[in-house]
Image (cartoon, helix red, strand yellow):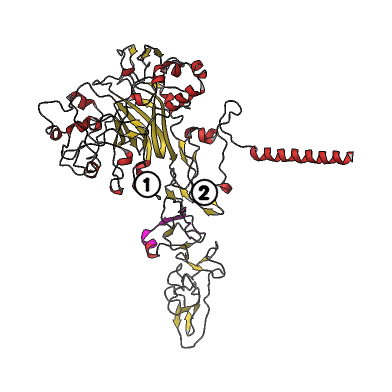
Amino acid sequence: MHSELQMTFALWLLLLLTGLYINAAYYFPQNAIYPRSTEFNNTPSRSTVPYHKASQLPPSFDAASSHCRVASEDVNCLPPFQNIAYGRPVQTTSTCGVFKVQRLCVADGTCHVCSGNSRKRRFSPDHLTDAHSTRNYTCWASSLVRAGGPEQAVNLTISLGKRFEVDYVSLQPCIEGAIPDSIAIYKSSDFGRSWRPWHYFSTDCFRAFGLPTTHEYKTHITTANLQEVICVGLPPREDYFTKNFRRRRSSINMHKHVRRNLSSIELGEFEATLNSVISFSTTLGRPATQPWSPALIDWMTMTDVRISMMRFPASLTADYRAKRTVEPLPSSILRHLAPNRPPYISKRKPRRPYNPRAFADASYIGPYGEGNRRRFGYRHLRSSQTEYGDLEVPPLDFASPMNDTNSTFEALVPKVEQVPLSGPHLLSPTEPDVLSAAEFFALADLTIGGRCKCNGHAKECIVDASGHLRCACEHNTDGDDCERCKSGFMDRPWERATAQSAKSCTQCDCNLHSSECRFSNALYLMSNRVSGGVCENCQHNTAGRNCQHCAEGFYRDWTKPISHEHACLPCRCHPIGSIIRHDCDRRSGQCRCKQGVTGITCDRCLDGYHQTRSSTNPCTKDFAPQTMALAHTPGK
């Protein structure tokens, strides 16, 4: 009895250990890539590694298990959604501590040293795109930002080196520093060669950009004006930080030992400030039903982003309009303003109710938005543009004369000045040693959420041998963005993949005689959208759209299939008996014989003809019918 209990216990223990081993093998497979952890594993996951450093990771692409194929069928696939700005260098037009050590002081008298030569005391632009959390709260700070002067605008530029499809752009203000009066976001889709407005923020949209203050949820954007640029009210600084943490911002921001000793409630309150961001969504309030329209895809696509932060001058002057990053208001608009008082009236009139005509009619400017609205839980300032009441003015045109209608887009948005990416044009050795909180901008984080643009034909982006970022294209596509069909796979036109169909490129039917082809839309339509490929550079003595015929001077060997390498044989016409030596019927191989000559290769005289020594008339007619072979036949 005792031995039976021992055996039962041993068996039970063996089963338990086996189960633990199987579970461990299931949850912790070998060669797995785990999320980045500073305590257990320093191997970063692919989702936390910048795109331009992805080559440092072990390859994870496996064609057999690719997400672009499911059960031997091509499906739509997308690269992972990431913060594509993470780890990217940011070019700025102003950073504190570049020319000399400066002090950044806040309202409570606390000052922080900013020095570009000190690793611990610099407010570098790299802090905008580093790992951002409550345990790694770093800030970038600009140098002097003076209202009305040449330093009233600061630009941040990120170049990605490849096209991306962006869902949102967000900025998190730092606890130190001022909130800009206006923020303009520009994008480039051609690697910085040209720029176009993307989105505007401002405490006074009409004053800054000549646009009504609106809200993403209340816009009247349709497919007809899908790429219309709007201006959203910018909440005041107080809406981003709680009163308690504005009082303690210096210790929270700068001293790590204080941050470690925060209680769970205080830490939660501090984390809430990390979520107080200025964000712009490329799809919110716009027609974004699947599949996306080409206009929406173009609206979301970019290679570079430039963020221009601006301050309002103390008064509206000609200098202010000249130094801004947009063109001044036309005189035709200023004439409608009251002549005996400044354009921006200090006496506030009662706010008028929302009028949808302001969004439906481009020529109607008043009453400019909805005043106090809430965006992401934050209160909007009432724009001073509502002080004009129901003011009707001609359509705004900042980029071209009023009578120029060549460019619809340029007529609706401000013209962007080409501002250098870096350099001392906004900094000078005479800048002050001490900056108050209202004299510099400070941001803790710049996030761009999006995907590597692969048009649904790749599941990841890779760095090639030349260091260039490109899509790992599948579905027989090619190009940096999988924007075209691979050579030899152009039987149908290239299309972007959708959730319903992968739109894979189809191989041209060249009967194994060519790997090159081109697409013919005319043939594609004639075939009822079945096939439009035209083979090029046919090999093995073949010709035709599908390399299905023998080339001139060759004939078909019907003992072999057309895809055989030797399916076409050279014509073997007699040099004297044939009219053209290398010309025969491509199907039968029959040569074109001279008069009185017969045979497949024109090597014999007809009955009733006899051979002569003439090369022009090798066979002449006689009176004695007979068949005479020529003295010489090819190959003998």
Residue drawn at x 56%, y 54% is: 72
Residue drawn at x 57%, y 26% is: 38
SS category of the residue bearing label 2: loop
In terms of image quadrants, where is residue 379? top left
Q: Report the residue marked by disc 2.
A: 68
The residue segment tinted magenta is 498-524
Dot label at residue 270: none
| Residue 313 picture location, percent across and down | 23, 22
**Which secondary structure type mostly characterizes the magenta part of the structure?**
loop
| Residue 511 picture location, percent across and down | 51, 61
Name the amino acid type tagged 1: Ala
Considering depth in this image, is 193 or 269 the residue closer to the camera?
Answer: 269
Whether residue 4 appears in magenta in the rendering, the answer is: no
In which quadrant of the rendered image does the N terminus lie? top right
Considering depth in this image, is 194 or 263 the residue closer to the camera?
Answer: 263
Q: Report the residue marked by disc 1.
A: 288
| Residue 173 picture location, percent across and down | 38, 25
